Amino acid sequence: MSFPIDRPRRLRVSKGLRRLVRETHLHVDDLVQPYFVVPGEDVRSEISSMPGQYHLSIDRVAIAAKRAYESGIPAIILFGIPETKDDKGSGAYDEKGIIQCAIRSIKEVVPDLLIIADVCLCEYTSHGHCGIIKEGRVDNDSTLELLAETAVSQARAGADIVAPSDMMDGRVAAIRDALDAEGFVDTAILSYAVKYASSYYGPFREAVDSTPQFGDRRGYQMDPGNVQEALREAELDLEEGADMIMVKPGIAYLDVLSAVKQTFQRVTATYQVSGEYAMIEAAAKNGWIDRRAVIMETLLAFKRAGADFIITYFAEEVAGWLNE
Ligand code: PBG
Ligand code: ZN
């Protein structure tokens, strides 16, 4: 059957028809809002590289979390900026660390809001790398213990989900073992299984002051040209016990997201990262794009490509739009 019998435009005639046949939907349940937690009290200062996003002290992040919960968002993800950094990233696994304290405070205010804790050392190391440096290189195996310790301390504070973003080999198994040994059998692991060495992280690194002091992250994060390797990374993390996996960044890696989702049929998330956020904000500020329309189209694209949920700096605002 073909034209003139078949006319695809028939199903686009009206808003009602378009709604009826739409294949993909964005829902408030799909959104995760990141927050940046800083030391101090009553701090709410705009991040220059990410206009509209803020450094929040613990008291302020608890208020923001409550608002996010009331907007219907199921989960938030936390990043911490410690008072001091050292070569071992001690602040990441300190029982009284910034994230551990923030988790406890948020759980007191909104116990039902899911808290995802990012597991990595780069926000806490003086050199800005995601692991321990040995002979000028990030040492995989000695980093694993510290990542496991970080995840356990976050679970102890009340994190529902831990999300390793370091890209060390074997970290999911190391974290699962450590969590189980401490009795945290129900703490889920969301692995940044497929994380590229991307230039889109720039604004985030400025926000948390984690730009590597020497070299770059290409020795542990993935090469942007690879997709077979992405499937291998996802497979390994699932074998090691990841409950959910993530592809990051988002918009430039939709093909990878689609391949990972179709291959494994497991809960798969994506992260619309800081550079993606900053680009949309910058273009919108100049009046070059319709900000709201572009945000909604982009988030819908992640869903269409196979994302079960999306970590996005737009989460709270989009939840508001979806509730209108
Ligand atoms: C830490 C981490 C990074 C991001 C999330 N966790 C930065 C990096 O790997 O350099 C990036 C998030 C963003 O750009 O929004 N490992
Ligand atoms: Zn890191």
Image (cartoon, rainbow, N blue to C red):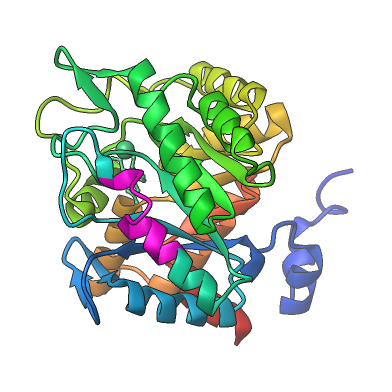
Q: Residue furthest left?
A: 213
* Horizontal relation, residue 61 to residue 8: left or right: left
- Relative to 103, does residue 90 appear above or below in the rendering? above
Residue at (29, 72) in percent of width and height: 56
Query: Which one is nearer the viewer's eye here, 316 or 159?
Result: 159
* Horizontal relation, residue 31 to residue 49: left or right: right
Percent of width and height locating residue 180:
64, 35
Percent of width and height locating residue 260:
62, 31
Percent of width and height locating residue 137:
20, 16
User: Which span is picked out in magenta?
Assistant: 91-103
Query: Which one is nearer the viewer's eye here, 159 or 10?
Result: 159
- Which of the 4 quarters of the picture holds residue 226? top left
* Horizontal relation, residue 245 to residue 47: left or right: right
Q: Quadrant of the N terminus?
A: top right
Q: Quadrant of the C terminus?
A: bottom right
Residue at (16, 45) in percent of width and height: 85
Numbered label tally? 0
Residue at (58, 58) in percent of width and height: 300
Q: Is residue 251 visible from the viewing direction of this image?
A: no
- Which of the 4 quarters of the picture holds residue 223? top left
- Relative to 171, does residue 8 appear above or below in the rendering? below
Q: Residue furthest top?
A: 135
Query: Which one is nearer the viewer's eye here, 88 or 233?
Result: 88
Residue at (52, 66) in percent of width and height: 296
